[in-house]
Amino acid sequence: MTEEADLIAVPDRYRTGLRGWYRKAGSIGVLASRTDALKREEKLMTASLILQRKLFGLVYRLLQPDYFDVMPRDSGVYVSIAVRTNRILPEVSNPGDIDLLVIPYEGDELLLSRVIAAEIKIIRASFQRQGKSPNEMGFSQAGQLLDAGFPYVAVLHLIVSDQSPEHAWEPMGRTTILNEDGLCGPLTTELVDTLPKRLLDRGIGRLLSARTRSEIGLAAAFLGATDDEVTHVNRGAGMWFPEGSAAAPNPNRKPEIGLEIAAYFERNSRWFADIPRFDPERR
């Protein structure tokens, strides 16, 4: 059979009777030690991104804007963290883990050709160390994921920091949106800690400069400046829009990898978070 025929024979969708876990707003997402929370450990910070569903949605839109904007009502993504690569591809040992595995779905079908495998790095910045960089950028591991044949690959830098002293805050305009047509109330001015915006600008600039292969998607997201924000105790905290660059289809994608990913999901669906495209609590 020719390679072209093989590509046609492998389905882009897979029907499943299983679902990931879903948490209603305000419920406990994950349990973690206070030590890990204070250290802002990588897996916990990755879980923090997943549990901030609006923020995660903005990151996902940056990586796959062509699909995000046309996702149907019954769609979303299943997301798992720290997936052992050889649990999907036994012959692949590097990288050892897929930090974030994102499987889009529509109804009861997994979209195998849209799967994203992402490498994550944590940026632990501060007001005094705004230029803080990770020890590794993540592109070596991302290249290995491309070579392994995953459909889409991305590098995400998740940023945490402290707060700026109030003398460094800057005036910004503020208004209230009054209706669905976008009518706004009076514009007022207030002082805002803009350190997150500066860190995001640095983060995406660093990623764009270091990107080794054009098909790798990029995103820099700010998780929070205080422990309560990062761990969602302060649920009323605002959100800074992430910065990023779309992922392109992997030219070395291996069509058969989709069925391997589907088989992994069938065995481990309980470890995948269900993040719907539209809020099911408002339907």
Image (spheres, rainbow, N blue to C red):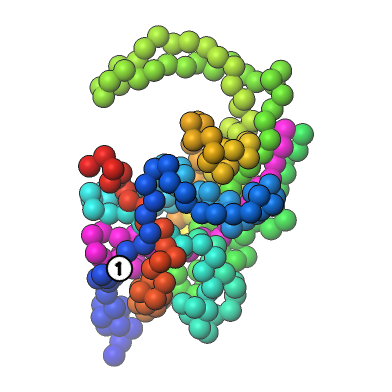
Front one among 203 and 232: 232
Asked if residue 80 is positioned above or below residue 75 in the image, the reply reads below
Task: Determine the secondary structure under disc 1.
Answer: loop
Q: Residues within 10 Å of mark 1 (few under 14, many from 20)?
A: some
Identify the residue at horizontal 49%, vertical 35% (top origin): 235
Report x, y in % for residue 60.
42, 50
Residue that lies at the very extreme toward the bottom in this rendered image: 1
Name the residue that disc number 1 marks. Answer: 18
Residue 211 visible somewhere in the drawing: no
Report x, y in % for residue 211.
58, 55
Q: Left or right: where does residue 72 sit relative to residue 85?
A: left
Identify the residue at horizontal 59%, vertical 16% (top origin): 191
Of the residues shown, which amino acid type is indicated by label 1? Leu
Asked if residue 159 is positioned above or below residue 110 in the image, the reply reads above
Magenta span: predominant SS is: strand
Identify the residue at horizontal 42%, vertical 16% (top origin): 175
Q: Left or right: where does residue 258 sit relative to residue 158?
A: left
Identify the residue at horizontal 25%, vertical 65% (top origin): 109
Looking at the figure, which quarter contains the N terminus? bottom left
Asked if residue 274 is positioned above or below residue 197 in the image, the reply reads below
Front one among 57 and 21: 21
Residue range (magenta): 102-127
Residue 105 visible somewhere in the drawing: yes
Report x, y in % for residue 73.
23, 49
Asked if residue 191 is positioned above or below residue 116 in the image, the reply reads above
Q: Is residue 112 magenta?
A: yes
